[in-house]
Image (cartoon, rainbow, N blue to C red):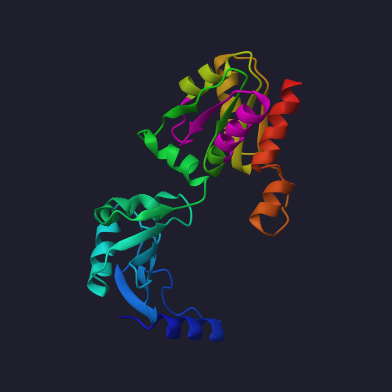
Amino acid sequence: MADLIDISTRIIDSGVVDQMVNRVTNELSELGDDLAIIESFSHCVAFDSGDGVVCFDASGVHTGEAVVAALKKWRTDRVANLVYTHGHADHVGGSTYFAADQPTVTGHRNVNTRLDRYDYTFEVGKAKVVRPGDDAVVVSSGLMTMRALLAAEKLSELHGVELSVVDCATLKPFDEDTVVAQLDTNRPAFTAENHTVVGGLFEAVAGALVRRGVARQVRPIALPDEFLDAGALPTLHDKYGLSTDSVIARVLDALR
């Protein structure tokens, strides 16, 4: 059992990182009375409430079993509550191994939207329509697919606008057939990526359209080709137009 408090204190006080700090050992270490952490991918923090164990994150699909095994050596009580800090697969994928205890699961309402991305089978080189819509279309990648899905939900509920979201999971190889087919319509078209407008999804889409002889305007939602400010991500996403509200505004503006 590692003394993680001692390790953390030493590294923070000295400013010298002399060992791995994000380890995947699947070993449990106690941090205090009734409080422990299992170092894995991702980590799982556990608290014995006296009325069952509360766990924060379930680790990934490949590590969840080992995490639960380490947890049960520490406390045999059932896991009463499982809290998702967010919806990334390495934080929720191990939930199957917690299911036997039938815990109450708690997470932000947007976690459901994030988890919807895992309902389809990932295929290298294949773009997929993850939400259909007749009014506008966005080809997205990475975290911007989640933003696009959230924007589509709000556009539908608040404005009666149906935005189609096409998740482009890989750029190399790039699924020209699906992307061009989805953009070759009369709908206002966008790309959305957490990347500069140069050398990423937007240019891959533009190149595909030119090669196929499809004359369509595509509006990029991306970072500008310039030195960017530093700061908190939500602030920067608002500044550079990558927030959900920014996506909504761009779509509504194009439909006017």
Q: Where is residue 69 in the image (x, y as percent from the top left)?
A: 23, 65
Quarter of the image for the C terminus: give it: top right
Of residue 246 and residue 209, the one placed in the foreground of this image is: 246
Of residue 81 and residue 91, the one placed in the foreground of this image is: 81
Q: Where is residue 120 in the image (x, y as percent from the top left)?
A: 37, 33
Q: Position of residue 40 (x, y in %)?
A: 35, 64
* Magenta stretch holds residue 160: yes
The reply to whether residue 43 is in sight is no
Query: Does 148 sit above or below residue 5?
Result: above
The reply to whether residue 7 is in sight is yes
Q: Quadrant of residue 77?
A: bottom left
Q: Residue at x 25, y 58 (%)?
A: 65
Query: Does 177 sit above or below residue 168?
Result: above
Of residue 140 and residue 227, the one placed in the foreground of this image is: 140
Q: Which residue is drawn at 64% across and 15% down?
A: 215
Query: Does 241 sit above or below residue 36?
Result: above
Q: In which quarter of the image is residue 137?
A: top right
Identify the magenta region.
147-175
Q: Residue at x 49, y 78 (%)?
A: 17
| Left-right relation of 86 to 41 | right
| Left-right relation of 75 to 251 | left
Q: Which residue is drawn at 66% across and 21% down?
A: 188
Quarter of the image for the N terminus: give it: bottom left
* Magenta stretch holds residue 25: no
Q: Where is residue 105 in the image (x, y as percent from the top left)?
A: 40, 53
